[in-house]
Amino acid sequence: MGAVTGYLYLSALLFSLGVLGVLVGRNTIVILMCVELMLNAVNIAFEALSVHFQTLDGQIAVFFVMSVAAAEVAVGLAIVITLFRNYLSVETHDAVTLRG
Amino acid sequence: MSLAAIIFSILTIISSLGVIGCANPLNSALCLVLTLFFVAAHYAMMGAHFVAAIQVLVYAGAIMVLVIFVIMLLGLERDESSSDFKKPRNVLTAAVIGLFIGMLIVAVQSGVAGAPVDGLADASIVNDGGGHAIGQVLFTRYVLPFEITGMLLLAAIIGAVYIAHEQRKPLAEGRGLKAVRNRE
Amino acid sequence: MSTIDIIAAAPLFCMTFGILALLVLDLFRIDALPFPRLWWGVGICGATAFLFWPFLSMNETAFSGMMAVDTFTFAFALMILGGSAVTFMLSDELLEGQRVEPSADLDLLVLFSALGGIMMVAATHMMLLFVGFELLSICVYVLTGSARNQRASSEGALKYFILGAFSSAFLLYGMALVYGATGSMYYSGIAAHIGEPSMMLLIGIGLMIFGFGFKVSLVPFHFWTPDVYQGAPTSMSGFMAVVVKAAAFGAFFRLMASGFGSVSASWSAMVAVLAVLSMTIGNVIALRQTSVKRMLAYSSIAHAGYAMVGFLALGEGGGAAVVFYMLVYSLMTLAAFGVVLVVSSGTEAQYDQDSIESLQGLGWTHPLLGIAMTVAMLSLAGVPPLGGFIGKFYLFSAAVRAGYTSIAVVAALNSVISLYYYLRVVVVMYFSGERQLSWEPPRVLVFGPRLALILLTTGTLYMGIFSSRYYETAQIAVRSLMQL
């Protein structure tokens, strides 16, 4: 089955590029976008496997991953906004800066 | 893989390199939108038209719009800070990623299982590509994860609103988002 | 729906309706509740736990084979709900000190995470595992950042979120590879069709361990733990250290034992390495900590390492030991965090009074807190006749029976090392020469935390002496799991 293997290679490559982006990235939102890239790579893998096996399980997995990714992005961006707001209003509490 | 699939794969890789490598976060976001479109094209070529449509609507259409919205709201499009790929730490990371890709390629090489074990193996409902079959499965076999996903979305809404909600007690004058826009 | 579905759904419905009722009540600001709102959360947890009781003696699956209705689910559901209820009781203190109008949002999120955790443990299909995992995680990201005007809280939330999303992507890719290698997403289907483990399967398992290792804070995936535990509001640190870890361990156990049990030879080596690294590094770094919350964070890393030892001995009672250890670990860690929470209650104070020195003389001024902390510390160190000792005994003896004697020795040595930093807290509380606290404690002990600490301390003592009945239940739980 050449097609599925080809798609799995594509998925592996995209996933690795996403990992590279997360490890190397300097802007928080870019890191978040690279995580989305990783999730899309996984989705491609699931879809290709679904077609290969001729069952719907992989496609359903794609749906669940998409919904979860949407929820995750919403919460993540909310956290980024809060952090930004706190970072600018430095006066409230300066005593604890987390190391590392 | 057909020629079209290969071409789209190359385009996907190129645009994802753009996501990682662009200096401006807004450009990264736009590259990601492009990548998502190419992924949707892959889904369509595999015959999953419904999923392709959802990918465009939800991922490229909703999630990325939100991300771009936040980038512009926080004024990040003026930050031009990309990762310096020549730093030794980044070279090491890239080497590790190379090994990682190698590992994954070995994994793929070893071959996929021949036949599904307990999937929904009715070929006719698989190949219709539309929502009918998916809807049927989602409410019969997968009803429990479906409902829990509903709870997850509710929880995410409550959580996101709670976290980002402006405090009742105002902070010092001129703080918060106003300061962002005035920042040079 | 068949009968089994209804039995399985009953506690889930109870939880869901409880959450929605709380949401509506909060929406319309119905403040005329005859009891404080926090106790609503305790009530929901209690009612749901009650509805889980039929699970105790069953061994089936529900909802098209997605959810396991067995003793194992029962045990972990009770642990998760108990931990959540205790978190509610301990948080009772905080609400009074806040200037912002109290809302039920945080309670809702705690209940949602409990639901996610239970789904994770009950899952026998990878999609339910994933969805439960994410429900738990997303709620906890928000809970970490819930002290919105504290920078440490938001930083911790962001760090946890990024690393959490990263590792759940690994978990997901592992799932895809396992699906590809075996053709099934059901644990039973995976087990039935593993055959000769291919590279795809093994690498998939490796990636899944990566994803879980982060949630459970094993070394080398532990770097987020001290910062996040320190930055989060203390009640939520306790919740994370106990409920999230217990849920993740339970889910991981079920996946490994019933899905990949037959290829355990392949992944035992990796597990052994992770266990030893976690124990050692967790203990060694804990020695140097001056902040109580960070010390407890490293302590929890070390304990994750001890628990992983049980995974090596699944055939020799190691599994039951892991389940039992989760129970005792929950009791003692929640007690420790509870004392820290009470001592530093009030949103600003807990970010100032985080050091071990601030506990000087606590044993004399607040006897209940002193006793609770002492019992918790000694139990964590593994001093007999407390629960912690019995738990470690079961774990290490299972490891020895399975032939991993050297690892058991390393674990025992680590326990001895850990005595130092656990005893140091006790010494500071009682023997530092101070009979007065050097700072002004906020208030007298409110009923909620008092009840919680009494329950936890009694539980730890009880487990030390009367453990056999609970250990037997754990054994039944694991046996039912292996057969599924």
Image: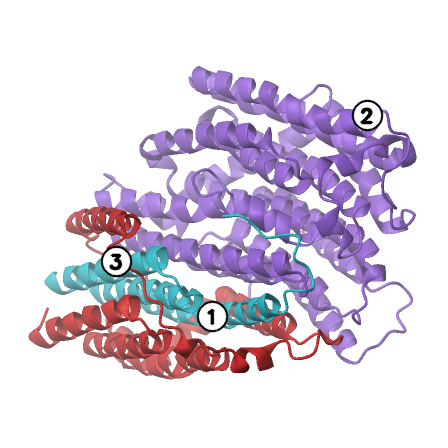
Chain colours: A cyan, B red, C purple
Q: What is the three-letter code of the residue carrying label 3?
A: Phe
Q: Position of residue A34 (x, y in %)?
A: 35, 65
Which residue is more in the foreground, C340 or C165? C340
User: How many other residues sit within 10 Å of disc 2, few (<14), some (14-19) or many (≥20)?
Assistant: some
Q: Element at badge 3?
A: loop
Residue C479 shown left or right of residue B117 in the figure = right
User: How many other residues sit within 10 Å of disc 3, few (<14), some (14-19) or many (≥20)?
Assistant: few
Which residue is more in the foreground, C104 or C396? C104
The N terminus of chain C lies in quadrant: bottom right
Residue C462 visible in this rendered orientation of the protein: no
Q: Which residue is mark 1?
A: A73
Residue A28 shown left or right of residue A83 in the figure = left
Q: Is residue C298 above or below residue C69?
A: above
Q: Is residue C188 above or below residue B18?
A: above
Q: What is the three-letter code of the residue carrying label 2?
A: Ser
Q: Which residue is mark 3?
A: B85
Residue A75 visible in this rendered orientation of the protein: yes
Chain identifier of the residue bearing label 1 in the image: A
Chain identifier of the residue bearing label 2 in the image: C
